[in-house]
């Protein structure tokens, strides 16, 4: 692991540098290649340790203030280790689920094509096209609404356009 240690308002001594390297060894086991940027600051009675770890596009960050610089570094390492474990667990779970899903897809029957596989029933009310737009807005999961146009007495369909802002009206001819 490549480690860059910078001190602001503090001189980074060999002891501090050794301590940072020793503690980052806990993090190093999770990565093949990683870079750690450590910034140590002193402001009045507060010691701040800020650690950024970057590996293969993934970034982890921890910032801790304490009266003792070594305690701040310890807390940062604990925080980073928790973040890394959480991310790794999440990735492993996604990989496992993806492999299970691919197995399920292989076991399924051949894909059904050109068949009606679902039928939905719903009430068609006589309303105006403007009211149909309002009713469609109340149902964000729906993309269209069939209704009887009060003005013409014919079945119409109002649908959301791809721009997501406007609507289209389908009316039968004659």
Image: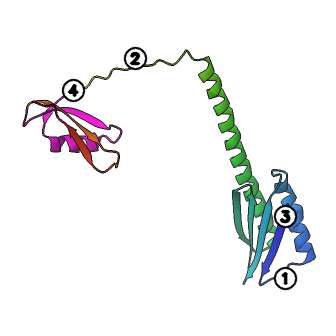
Does 147 appear above or below 10? above
Q: Nearer the viewer, mark 1 or mark 3?
A: 3
User: What residue range appears in magenta?
Assistant: 124-152
Q: Earlier in the sequence, mark 2 or mark 1?
A: 1
Q: Quadrant of residue 73?
A: bottom right
**Which disc is residue 2 wearing?**
3
Which quarter of the rendered picture does the C terminus lie within?
top left
Residue 70 lies within the magenta run:
no
For label 4, the residue is 123
* Between discs 4 and 3, the one toward the N terminus: 3
Q: Are marks 1 and 3 in contact (CB under 8 Å)?
A: no
- Gap in angstroms between the C-alphas marked 4 and 3: 66 Å
Label 1 SS = loop
Q: Is residue 143 above or below residue 27?
A: above
The residues bearing labels 4 and 1 have C-alpha atoms spaced at a distance of 76 Å
Q: Residues within 10 Å of mark 3 (few under 14, many from 20)?
A: few
Point out the tag, 4 or 1, that comes first from the N-terminus. Answer: 1
**C-alpha gap between disc 2 and disc 1:** 74 Å
Q: Pointers 3 and 2 in contact (CB under 8 A)?
A: no
Q: Between residues 82 and 164, which one lies in front from this camera angle?
A: 164
Give the residue displayed 71% in from the left and 39% down from the top.
Answer: 92
Q: Residue at label 2?
A: 115
Q: Is residue 85 above or below residue 67?
A: above
Residue indicated by mark 1: 11
Q: Are marks 4 and 1 in contact (CB under 8 Å)?
A: no
- Contact, CB < 8 Å: mark 4 with mark 2? no
- Give the number of the mark in front: 2 or 1: 2
Residue at 85% x, 60% y is: 1
């Amino acid at each position: 692991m490549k480690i860059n240690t910078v001190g602001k308002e503090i001189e980074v001594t060999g002891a501090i540098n050794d301590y940072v390297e020793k503690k980052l060894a806990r993090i190093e086991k999770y990565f093949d290649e990683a870079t750690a940027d450590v910034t140590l600051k002193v402001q009045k009675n507060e010691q701040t340790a800020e650690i950024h770890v970057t590996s293969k596009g993934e970034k982890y960050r921890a910032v801790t203030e304490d009266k003792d610089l070594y305690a701040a570094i310890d807390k940062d390492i604990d925080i980073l280790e928790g973040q890394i474990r959480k991310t790794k667990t999440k990735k492993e779970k996604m990989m496992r689920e993806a492999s299970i899903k691919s197995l399920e897809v292989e076991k399924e029957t051949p894909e059904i094509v050109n068949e009606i596989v679902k039928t939905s029933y719903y009430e068609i009310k006589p309303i105006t096209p403007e009211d149909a737009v309002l009713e469609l807005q109340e149902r964000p999961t729906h993309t269209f609404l069939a209704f009887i146009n009060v003005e013409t007495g014919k079945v119409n369909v109002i649908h959301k356009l791809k721009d997501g802002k406007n609507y289209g009206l389908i009316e039968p001819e004659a």
